[in-house]
Image: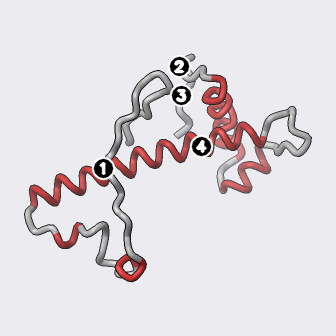
Amino acid sequence: MAEPTPRRNEPRLRPAPLLFEPTQVADDPEHFFDLESIDDPRALLARATELTHAFRAATDRAVEFQAIAAAQLADPRRFDRLTPGDIAERAEWTEDYARKMVEFGRDLLSGVEGRGHVDPV
């Protein structure tokens, strides 16, 4: 499980950079961020761990943005608001998960993340 994402009042740690994968190299299924070229197991473990943390941080941020978008789309003040079912269909979620993401997004937007709300992920 990924580590919790820092909230607004906590500084974000910068994960290792996800280096650009050139198209011709990315097409090779054996190639993954140049890890296959690292011979030293210590260096391989270090770089693979950096990438793991970077992907987890990216996932956490993406989930937060999904939640914010879901909350905005479900906002009752919008004339074109979507129901949790509509949001679930668009995001390929269950309707229950969409409701939780809308609530999580509202918490993020209002800055009240610490009131006992559990991250839906």
Q: Please name the amino acid that badge 3 sits on.
A: Val
Coordinates of residue 120 in the picture (x, y in percent): 56, 36
Task: Depth check: give the residue in front, 14 or 7.
Answer: 14
Residue at numbered disc 2: 114
- Mark 3–mark 1 Cα distance, whole angstroms, equals 27 Å
Q: Are marks 1 and 4 in contact (CB under 8 Å)?
A: no
In the rendered image of this protein, does residue 47 appear above or below residue 26?
Answer: above
Looking at marks 1 and 4 on the same chain, the residue that comes earlier in the sequence is marked by 1
Kind of element beneath mark 2: loop
Q: Please name the amino acid that badge 2 sits on.
A: Gly
Mark closer to the observer (1, 4):
1
Looking at marks 2 and 4 on the same chain, the residue that comes earlier in the sequence is marked by 4
Kind of element beneath mark 1: loop
Coordinates of residue 109 in the picture (x, y in percent): 65, 29
Residue at numbered disc 1: 16
Residue at numbered disc 3: 118
Kind of element beneath mark 4: helix
- Mark 1–mark 4 Cα distance, whole angstroms, equals 21 Å
Mark closer to the observer (2, 1):
1
Coordinates of residue 25 in the picture (x, y in percent): 35, 79
Q: In terms of image quadrants, where is residue 90?
A: bottom right
The residue located at (37%, 36%) in the rendering is 3
In the rendered image of this protein, does residue 90 appear above or below residue 68?
Answer: below
Q: In terms of image quadrants, where is residue 80?
A: top right
The residue located at (60%, 20%) in the rendering is 112
Looking at marks 3 and 1 on the same chain, the residue that comes earlier in the sequence is marked by 1
